Amino acid sequence: MSRGPRKTIEDKIREKEELIQGLKTRLQSENKELEALRQEKRAKEIAEIAGFLEESGVTIEQARDILEQHIAQDSGDEADCA
């Protein structure tokens, strides 16, 4: 049985280059989609935090102060353990 003409090494190289280029394009597209999903997640998280602060009657400045105090306290506690 005849299997048809064999591909030259140049044909094989060209096909691999085309395949790689196609994969690079797909990877770029997937990375863009991933970044969009991450941005969507971040926006939802920010909206959730903003809603919680609003419901609690806490301003952003007050929340920042509370977090800074908490972080400073935790840092002090870790120094005591060392």
Image (cartoon, rainbow, N blue to C red):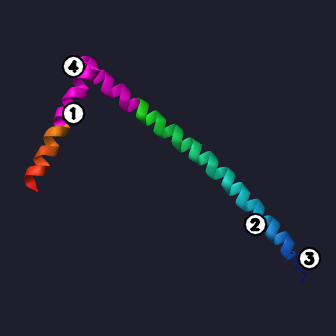
Across and down, in percent, residue 30 comes to 59, 47
The residue under label 2 is which amino acid type? Lys
Lower sequence index among marks 3 and 2: 3
49 falls in the magenta region: yes
Q: CA distance from mark 1 to mark 4?
A: 18 Å
State which mark lies toward you, 1 or 4.
Answer: 1
Q: Is 24 located above or below residue 66 in the figure?
A: below
Q: Which mark is residue 56?
A: 4
Whichever of callouts 1 and 4 sits on the residue coming sooner in the sequence is 4
Q: Which residue is identified by label 2?
A: 16
* Magenta segment, prevailing SS (helix, strand or loop): helix
Task: Please rate how many residues cluster around mark 1, counting C-alpha atoms within 10 Å: few if below 14, some from 14 to 19, many from 20.
Answer: few
Q: Residues within 10 Å of mark 2 (few under 14, many from 20)?
A: few
Q: Which residues are magenta?
A: 44-70
Q: Which residue is mark 3?
A: 5
Q: Contact, CB < 8 Å: mark 1 with mark 3?
A: no
Q: Secondary structure at mark 4?
A: helix
Task: Give the quadrant of the N terminus.
Answer: bottom right
Which of discs 3 and 4 lies nearer the camera? The answer is 4
Q: Secondary structure at mark 1?
A: helix
Disc 3 or disc 2, which is closer to the eye? 2
The kind of residue on which mark 4 rests is: Ser
Residue plotted at (73% across, 57% down): 21
- List the residue tagged with mark 1: 68
Q: Calculate the distance from the C-alpha at mark 2 to the C-alpha at mark 4.
A: 59 Å
Q: Secondary structure at mark 3?
A: loop
Whole-angstrom CA distance, mark 2 to mark 1, is 55 Å
- Residue drawn at (62%, 52%) of the image: 27
Kind of residue at disc 1: Glu
Type of the residue with mark 3: Pro
* Label located before the other in sequence (1 or 3): 3
